[in-house]
Image (spheres, rainbow, N blue to C red):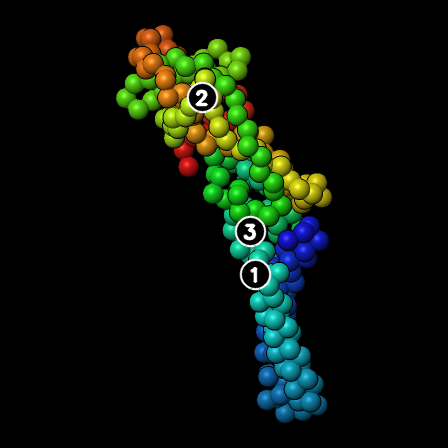
Amino acid sequence: MNYDTWVFAERFVNTWLPAGLVGGLLLFTGGLLAYFHKGRARPWGIGAAILGLLTVGVSFIFLYQPSTQAYMKDFGHVTPRARVEDPTFFGYQATSGALTGIYAMVRNDDDMRQLPMYSRHAVTQKVRYAGDADGSYYFYVGDIYSPINYIGPVEKRNVAAPYLRGYRYTLKDDQYKTIGFINPVNATTMALVIPNSLKHRPPTNDVLQNAKRLAKLDTGWTTEEK
């Protein structure tokens, strides 16, 4: 689905469809009342009732068009991680900044990968192993002083050093930015990759006392949990 098709379907679902259904039902109801009322309004009542039925019928025809159904399916995967404006009857309304801030840190890959306006690119970043215990892995990433307490998926591979593996999502068409879509700031965390030859060791007390979760620091990565 391209940008123009998305915008047309979105405006139909949020504006034209409710207006058509409400307007059509009002015309139909008013037409019936006029028809059963004796007087000059009776012929107009028949026309209004027919016009109301036609309006409702055309609205349902457009509702079940493949492009509209595809939009409604894809829209179910849109979250504040991908979009910071919500469609309304009259246009668009900014999403709460607190909500977008929370979603910026959420992995949410199951939804992001379903959105047709995004491309997905694999990204990695080396980390410095600081021990593991009780299902948690501890490491340092980038220039951040605090160690990370990681409890997500771990993959063992024939590699020389441990690293984070994930995806970065970018818009295929920047026109989507005009209706609130964004390029997510943080990379989606998929797994911690560790060497098969890694010699496991317990973390030091200093690491345990100062460790923080991945998304709590400005690491450029989301949470590791789904």
144 displayed left or right of 31:
left
Q: Nearer the viewer, mark 1 or mark 2?
A: 2
Work out whether mark 2 precedes mark 3 in sequence or the reverse, and give the earlier one.
3
* Percent x, y of residue 7: 67, 53
Mark 2 vs mark 3, foreground winner is: 2
Residue that appears at 51% across and 51% down? 76
Mark linked to residue 75 = 3
In the image, 94: left or right of 196? right
Which residue reaches farthest left? Answer: 134
- Does residue 175 sit above or below 162 in this rendering? below
| Residue that badge 1 annotates | 69
- Splitting the image into 4 quarters, where does residue 212 fall? top left
| Towards the viewer: 166 or 175 | 166
Q: Are marks 1 and 2 in contact (CB under 8 Å)?
A: no
Q: Work out whether residue 171 can be spotted.
A: yes
Which percent across, then down, holds residue 93? 63, 45
Above or below, 200 relative to 156: above
The answer to which of 10 and 133 lies nearer the viewer is 133
Amino acid identity at mark 1: Gln
Location of mark 2 (residue): 159
Query: In this view of the protein, which residue sits in the foreground, 127 or 218?
Result: 127
Are the two marked residues, 1 and 3, in contact with CB atoms closer than 8 angstroms? no
Residue visible at 57% across and 58% down in the picture: 70
Q: Residues within 10 Å of mark 1 (few under 14, many from 20)?
A: some
**Image point (60%, 48%), residue name:** 116
Q: Position of residue 203 (x, y in %)?
A: 33, 12
Q: Amino acid at mark 2?
A: Val
